[in-house]
Amino acid sequence: METVKHVPVLFDAVMAMLQPRPGGRYLDCTVGSGGHAAGLLQRCAPEGRVLATDADPTAIARVRARFGDHPCLTLRQCWLDEVPALVEALGFAPLDGVLIDLGLSSDQLEDATRGFSFQREGPLDMRFDPTQGMPAWAWLDRVDRVVLARVLREYGEVPNATRVAEAIWRARPIRTTTQLRDAVSAVMRMRRRRIHPATQVFQALRIAINDELRRLREALPALMALLAPGGRIAVIAFHSLEDRIVKQVFRAATRSAAFDYGVAPMAQFRLITRKPITPSPQEIAANPRARSARLRVAERVPVLQEEAR
Ligand SMILES: C[S@@+](CC[C@H](N)C(=O)[O-])C[C@H]1O[C@@H](n2cnc3c(N)ncnc32)[C@H](O)[C@@H]1O
């Protein structure tokens, strides 16, 4: 078995919320290194099925190596917003549970060739799927400085975004992770900060390069419409903008105006988590990358309750 570095976040909470059962059908849209998928597979086997997807071909290869030819597992490389069409094409709906665990895995972060980490010298790529689109260094070559400042401000909540954007813009051409880190460090002070200033800049660029917020916004209602009555969707977000999208789509789906967000009018949902579930101090101590995780869960109203309305 290939070595996996990623430790699944909020594993017990996800299993408690999705309640995977023997014979059920589960969709893991961000399989990563397969941590949550392992729990789903174990609980739904031998009759159940897990469809696991990820935009990253390396993640798919890693999970394939981890589970071999598991009879209950179907693996496909696919962007989040393309998953609903894949589910339809495979005839995999209705679903008993859906998991979306956003962001990136430790295995991606620690692979210097992917360009996600300012702590590792490597090409500034940042694409989840390196076979498509533009690497971050090429995007920086072409970007307008006003757009760059907006990306830093909105996706990274970078203080003095205009100044930081200006510094990055002037430092171009930037080809590597450490060149970007150094351009940022020159204008952002480390003092009184819990995290390195480059953290927010790298996060902002990654979100922009992979168009992560649009994909989430489009995918969520379409995935919810594929749930069986009583089926649940669980989303772990690591960023306030992601969490806000999840909260808004879930809220809308619990109201009759649910179709404002594209959820089928007949699809009625209830919130299982009024407030997001967050990791315990013990989990954060053991896995500091869990610190900003927020888990929200919604359930498609079981048939009897739907009829009683
Ligand atoms: C935090 S990791 C998932 C870890 C996984 N739950 C586990 O336990 O191993 C997030 C994964 O989602 C993928 N990902 C993030 N955004 C995506 C998107 N918009 N479409 C498809 N995959 C995405 C990343 O490539 C990464 O592998």
Image (cartoon, rainbow, N blue to C red):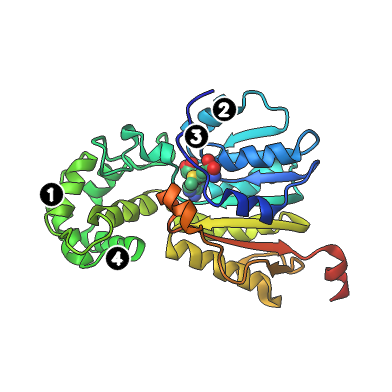
Q: Secondary structure at mark 3?
A: helix
Tell me, yes or no, whether the two marked residues, 4 and 2, touch with CB atoms within 8 Å.
Answer: no
Using the image as rendered, state which of residue 32 and residue 136 is in the foreground.
32
Between residue 281 and residue 22, name the one nearer to us.
Answer: 281
User: Cα distance, mark 3 to mark 1?
Assistant: 32 Å
Q: Using the numbered discs, state the Cα–Cα distance from disc 3 to disc 4 in whole angstroms.
A: 30 Å
Secondary structure beneath dot 2 equals: helix
What is the secondary structure assignment of the residue under circle 1? helix
287 vs 244: above or below? above
| Distance from the alpha carbon under mark 4 to that under mark 1 | 19 Å
Q: Which residue is mark 2?
A: 66
Depth check: give the residue in front, 2 or 125. Answer: 2
In the rendered structure, find residue 153 and report the number of the disc placed on it. Answer: 4
* Residues under numbered marks 3 and 4 in contact, where contact means CB atoms less than 8 Å apart: no
Is disc 2 surrounded by few (<14), some (14 to 19) or many (20+) residues within 10 Å? Answer: some
User: Is residue 90 visible in this depiction of the protein?
Assistant: no
Dot placed on the residue nearer the N-terminal end, 4 or 1? 4
Label 3 near ligand 1 (CB < 8 Å): yes
Mark 3 or mark 2, earlier in chain: 3
